[in-house]
Image (cartoon, rainbow, N blue to C red):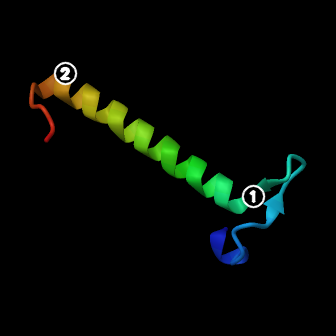
Amino acid sequence: MLAEHPDLSVRLGKDAIAVRELLVHRIEEYARHCGHADLLRECIDGRVGQ
């Protein structure tokens, strides 16, 4: 999808959200879920991340 929009300031959809904003949101969500996975792993094996 990003290859189709080399200009990240292009606005898409009915809400006219910039591609850059969509990309940042995806990164934030991915990081949040990785953090949750770390918490679950810590509960299971007791090891604390560094």
Question: Which quarter of the picture shows residue 5?
Answer: bottom right
Q: Position of residue 6 (x, y in %)?
A: 69, 78
Residue 36 or residue 9, whichever sits in front: 9
- How many C-alpha atoms fall within 10 Å of the one at disc 2: few (<14), some, or many (≥20)? few
Question: Label 1 is placed on what type of residue?
Answer: Ala
Q: What residue does disc 2 label?
A: 43
Name the residue located 75 percent from the left edge and 58 percent from the top edge: 18
Left or right: 22 in relation to 17: left
Q: Position of residue 35 (x, y in %)?
A: 34, 36
Ranked by sequence position, the earlier of labels 1 and 2 is 1
Q: Position of residue 38 (x, y in %)?
A: 26, 34
Name the residue located 15 percent from the left edge and 38 percent from the top edge: 49
Q: Position of residue 9 (x, y in %)?
A: 74, 66
Name the residue located 60 percent from the left edge and 57 percent from the top edge: 23
Above or below for 1 versus 30: below
Above or below for 47 versus 29: above
Which is closer to the viewer, label 1 or label 2? Answer: 1
Question: Which quarter of the picture shows residue 45?
Answer: top left
- Of the 4 image quadrants, the one containing the C terminus is top left
Q: What residue does disc 1 label?
A: 18
Question: Label 2 is placed on what type of residue?
Answer: Cys
User: Is label 2 in a helix, a strand or a loop?
Assistant: helix
- Of the 4 image quadrants, the one containing the N terminus is bottom right
CA separation in Å, label 1 and label 2: 38 Å
User: Is label 1 in a helix, a strand or a loop?
Assistant: strand
